[in-house]
Image: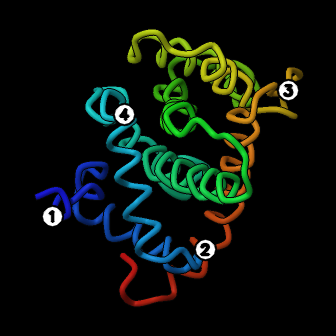
């Protein structure tokens, strides 16, 4: 029966990460119903990415000295879906498939950064292009809009802005997630249930 499927568990590689993601969602004020809906969308549209070695590797590298790249990726994807659901309620046409793929793939190119890039500045400029190439390998017929959203997600640090709604959703989700992660990581470490 579909209502018993643990989509959250299918998107998180282990129980600790799952519980931390759920805790963060609660602290951000996202209700359980939206979180479960989002994880179902992540699994349905992002299954090819979720099952890839590249995605699994994201949980073995830190991001901004706070979390793993994988945890950040899930935060970005959940935030991107929250933005998308709000836009849909307001009458905008949002392609959920494109948003999920763009968010899940946006930092895949950062994996192995210390071997691939000479410094953080080069990583900032080049990892979006590496991420887009990986997305093309993982997703058959990757829409151009999704590829460009991924390759331009570091705007304004890089020169080319996004040109699509998917791109703007990704940038908004990525930046707001990074800020929230920095704030909540300090706050949540003081809470006994956070490990």
Sort mark 3 into few (<14), some (14-19) or many (20+) by Cα contacts within 10 Å: some
Read off the residue under disc 3. Answer: 161
Q: Residues within 10 Å of mark 4 (few under 14, many from 20)?
A: many
Compared to residue 102, the image places residue 187 above or below, namely below
Q: Give me the C-alpha separation between circle 1 and circle 2.
A: 30 Å
Q: CA distance from mark 3 to mark 4?
A: 25 Å
The residue labelled by disc 2 is: 184
Up-down relation of residue 155 to residue 89 (above or below) = above
Quarter where residue 19 is shown: bottom left
Kindly report the distance in space between the C-alpha atoms of the residues bearing marks 1 and 3.
Answer: 41 Å
Q: Name which of mark 3 and mark 4 comes first in the sequence.
A: 4
Whichever of labels 3 and 2 marks the residue nearer the N terminus, that label is: 3
The secondary element bearing badge 4 is classed as helix
Q: Earlier in the sequence, mark 2 or mark 4?
A: 4
Q: Which residue is mark 4?
A: 55
Real-space Cα separation, disc 4 to disc 1, in angstroms:
25 Å
Tell me the quarter of the picture where residue 170 sits: top right
């Amino acid at each position: 029966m579909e209502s018993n499927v643990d989509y959250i568990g299918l998107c998180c590689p282990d129980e600790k990460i799952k519980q931390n993601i759920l805790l963060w969602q609660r602290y951000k004020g996202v209700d359980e119903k939206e979180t479960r809906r989002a994880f179902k969308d992540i699994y349905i549209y992002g299954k090819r990415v979720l099952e890839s070695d590249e995605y699994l590797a994201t949980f073995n590298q830190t991001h901004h000295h706070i979390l793993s790249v994988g945890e950040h990726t899930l935060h970005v994807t959940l935030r991107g879906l929250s933005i998308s659901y709000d836009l849909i309620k307001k009458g905008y046409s949002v392609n959920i498939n494109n948003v999920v793929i763009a968010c899940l793939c946006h930092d895949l190119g950062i994996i192995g950064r210390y071997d691939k890039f000479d410094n953080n500045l080069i990583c900032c400029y080049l990892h979006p292009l590496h991420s887009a190439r990986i997305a093309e390998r993982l997703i058959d017929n990757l829409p151009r809009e999704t590829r460009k959203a991924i390759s331009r997600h570091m705007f304004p640090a890089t020169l080319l802005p996004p040109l699509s709604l998917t791109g703007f959703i990704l940038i908004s989700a990525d930046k707001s997630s990074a800020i929230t992660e920095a704030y909540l990581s300090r706050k949540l470490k003081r809470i006994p249930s956070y490990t």
